[in-house]
Amino acid sequence: MTSQAITFRPVRSTMRQWLSALMLGGALVLTQTVTAKATPETFAPLAEQISDSVVNITTSTTVAARSGPAPQIPEGSPFEDFFRDFMDRAPGGEGQRPRRSQALGSGFVISEDGFIVTNNHVIEGADEINIEFFNGEELPAEVIGTDPKTDIALLKVDSDAPLQPVPFGNSDEAQVGDWVMAMGNPLGQGFSVSAGIVSARNRALSGTYDDYIQTDAAINRGNSGGPLFNMDGEVVGVNTAILSPNGGSIGIGFAMSSNVVTKVVDQLKEFGETRRGWLGVRIQDVTDDIAESIGLETAEGALVTDVPEGPAMEAGMEAGDVIVSFNGNDIEDTRELVRRVGDAAVGAEVPVTVFREGDEVELTVVLGRREEAEAVPAAMSSDDAEELSETELLGITVAPLTDEMREELGVSNGMDGLAVTEVSEDSDAFEKGIRAGDVITEAGQEKVASASDLEARVEAAQEAGRKSILLLIRRGGEPRFVALPIE
């Protein structure tokens, strides 16, 4: 059997490893040689190629004078004129006029007719936006649209001559270890280039749609909104944030992936705003104990905790369903589901597969628009619970809900359930985060209105050989599932 090699330049000798592998167990074995690409001899050609497409951005904002009581100087004091003149000139002093504040950032041209991409936080609240090109030309810009969720903004300038755009690349093809180059306006120093590698992929900071490329290319204040290039001169990310204890680059920078940015830019260009798909569910990740409690083989998918009025309800989705596939794509967790739904077109008919009571159920959902969605709690009605006595079970003391309890605990009028009045601190329930004031509305994916309902569901789970039972709990009106051990 011959050896198979993946070879990059420079080729490094691996003869000793290869011979050792051949001799292992007296048999031939398949080996794979992996070597690294050489460091680019220079980044100069790439920097020259893209320099006319990268811009410096200066924004101006009117800042109102701060109001506040001025020091009281006795009339006739020899210092009266001095203090009056000082306070008129001082920041926030009486008589001070509104002042102008400036901020710096970066951006890049994406079309010959003047569209420019930058970060939303670079231009947010600005009265004036000025674009400076590499050749020194300056042009005013207008805001076409912004998306705070991905921190992307689209600007437009009017130029007499066609501008030089740069293309977007496929950020999914960027691999950890690939060379990248950043260009922008760090600390107001003008056009500046830094180089590094892709340090990590698919980073999430704090946003719902985060998909950041992490890089050690130097990124500082003023680089925000600038491009992160691959070695083909394609934009694979928009430099957005750094992780730093001192405000300067320590080699941990983040650029929003181009495959996220392009979708946002296309919508901003067409509509002046984003139009994301909306499923209309509340969800949480599936843990190992939750998967075991409902008979799901692997802890994957998105567990539906609530289905208010909206597309999912109309399609027949239910609380307790686990979304395992959306539009033909397997769903690993809630983050993936949110991103795929957001990327889908408003009004699209999308196939969704849910795991329900041991079986997979196929649904078709007509997506709404997230930006227009309003959470409307599902209307529920029931008679007041008849049982008023408290019951202790699995370390939890519960009592049927009364109207007074519903108002106090923040649950809908008429909603059935059990109010948790006490939790033993040495119980599994306490360890799982159940606390007094919680409301149990389902057990074993069936509604409960009395302690006897809960006891019956626990007995059924034990008879079925379950190690835990799935409880739907509301706290302050917000739902979440908890898999509570019952052994």
Image (cartoon, grey):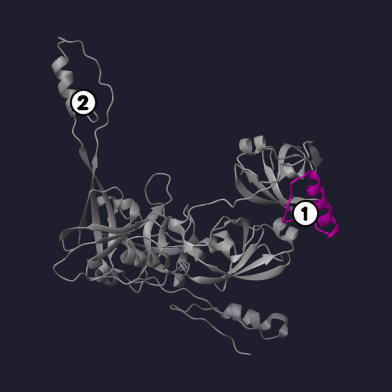
Q: Establish if 371 lies above or below 10.
A: above
Q: Establish if 387 lies above or below 350.
A: above
Horizontal and vertical percent for residue 369? 45, 61
Of callouts 2 and 1, the N-terminal one: 2
Between 274 and 131, the residue placed more toward the observer is: 274
Q: Which residues are magenta?
A: 443-468
Magenta highlight on residue 458: yes
Between 353 and 156, the residue placed more toward the observer is: 353
User: The N terminus is located in which quarter?
Assistant: bottom right
Evaluate if marks 2 and 1 touch, with contact meaning CB atoms under 8 Å apart: no
Q: Amino acid at mark 2?
A: Glu
Q: Residue at x 27, y 31 (%)?
A: 66
Q: Quadrant of residue 294?
A: bottom right
Residue at far right of view: 463
Horizontal and vertical percent for residue 244? 42, 48
Q: Amino acid at mark 1?
A: Ser
Name the secondary structure under disc 2.
loop
Residue at far bottom of view: 1
Which of the labelled discs sits on residue 468, or is there none? 1
Q: Residue at x 62, y 35 (%)?
A: 408
Horizontal and vertical percent for residue 441? 69, 48
Describe residue 305's horizontal placement relative to residue 267 as left or right.
right
Distance CA(mark 2)–CA(mark 1): 68 Å
Between 13 and 331, the residue placed more toward the observer is: 331
Q: Residue at x 24, y 36 (%)?
A: 64
Q: Residue at x 31, y 59 (%)?
A: 145
Crowding at mark 2 (Cα within 10 Å: few <14, some 14-19, many 20+): some
Name the secondary structure under disc 1.
strand
Which of the labelled discs sits on residue 118, or is there none? none
Whether residue 225 can be seen here: no
Which of the labelled discs sits on residue 94, or is there none? 2
